[in-house]
Amino acid sequence: MLATSTLQLMTTRLRNGDDTFALINANIPRHVGTVIQIERMYEYGDQHLSIVGRGRQRFELVDRVSLHHTMGQFMEGVSAQVRILPDFHAMPCPMPINFRRGGPSSSLKRRRPSLVAYWGPQQYMQFDGPSLVYQAKSILLQSVEYHAFMASTTNSTSSAAMSAPSDPTRFSYWLAAHLNLGLATRQRLLATSCVVGRLRALIEWLHHQSAVIQCSGCATTLAHTRAIFLKQDADHGGPASTFVNPYGAIHQILTMLAVERATYDPVGTPSLADTWFPGYTWQCISCVQCATFLGWRYVSTVEQAHPRVFFGLLRNAIG
């Protein structure tokens, strides 16, 4: 939860045109975070501040300085020395790899470099950026369960996967943002400066991903991945997955069209107060087996809305 003085400082900076902030989880070793550029700000009195931002650069915390506010209020970590982390982009292979071409001559073209190179094409492809991008997209195309999850702007998994960035660096961030990764995995990927290493880690995750979503507390099957969809931000138009409640807690959620009714218990009564999705009431839900807090059930106040009902599952509550 952010102190009132911290909110006031952030508001003042935004009003003065300073739209860049650093976001970091200082409790995790190595202290790698993200430079955020604020795109929109919404003020709700003196106690609440909603901001929409976009990640621009990665950084490592070098030193943190604690400052005192002029009113005598203690504000830890306001000033810090950071180092912008570079992305070690995928280097081109010493010889072209024609892995995307079909036809009888394709295998011959792949064999030709191996006649003069120390390693064969298969070895080079493990470290070739475009090859890894193509491999990841191919896995996505074969995954029926990811149809709704990947189709953030289209109705076709093929169109969504193929319209993703082709640049290996940009694609690695795009893929990490769209997959249902745990917080610890996301932090490890954020701390990975090698683009090839990041892509290979994502591909390994794709190979081992399951078709079902389970409760992290008791492994009860809650839903199938085919029920995943990307709820769009009503103002920005892009997918919305990270939210902050009025108490300052940050939640990453996975939006689902359906969750097995027998697997969760509703808690409390539906409410419109501080809803993250305008026009939808929210109600807490917990696992019926182990009582783990799973997230929320959203119901539209408008009969014709689509979807009429959906769920927001906490990423750290599912596996």
Image (cartoon, rainbow, N blue to C red):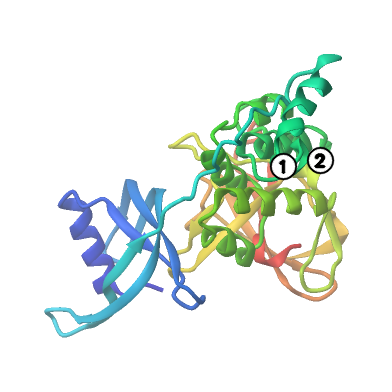
Q: Nearer the viewer, residue 270 or 151?
A: 151
Q: Verify CB contact (< 8 Å) between mark 2 and mark 1.
A: no
Q: Residue at x 76, y 62 (%)?
A: 319
Q: Callout 2: few (<14), some (14-19), or many (20+) C-alpha neighbours within 10 Å?
A: some
The x and y percentages for residue 275 are 51, 54
Image position of 281 (left or right of 294): left
Identify whether 159 is placed above or below 232. above
Q: Residue at x 64, y 27 (%)?
A: 96
Quick one: SS at disc 1? Answer: loop
Kindly tell me whether residue 37 is visible in this rendering: yes
Check disc 2 and report the residue beneath it: 145
Q: Nearer the viewer, residue 120 or 50?
A: 120
Identify whether 231 is placed above or below 50. above
What is the CA distance from the residue labelled 2 to the residue labelled 1? 40 Å
Image position of 210 (left or right of 172): right
Check disc 1 and report the residue beneath it: 118
What kind of residue is marked 1? Tyr
The outermost residue toward the left is 70
Q: Residue at x 62, y 67 (%)?
A: 184
Quick one: SS at disc 2? Answer: helix
Image position of 159 (left or right of 89): right
Identify whether 25 is placed above or below 51. below
Identify whether 65 is placed above or below 93. below
Q: Earlier in the sequence, mark 2 or mark 1?
A: 1
Kindly tell me whether residue 239 is visible in this rendering: no
The x and y percentages for residue 276 are 51, 52
The x and y percentages for residue 126 are 71, 45
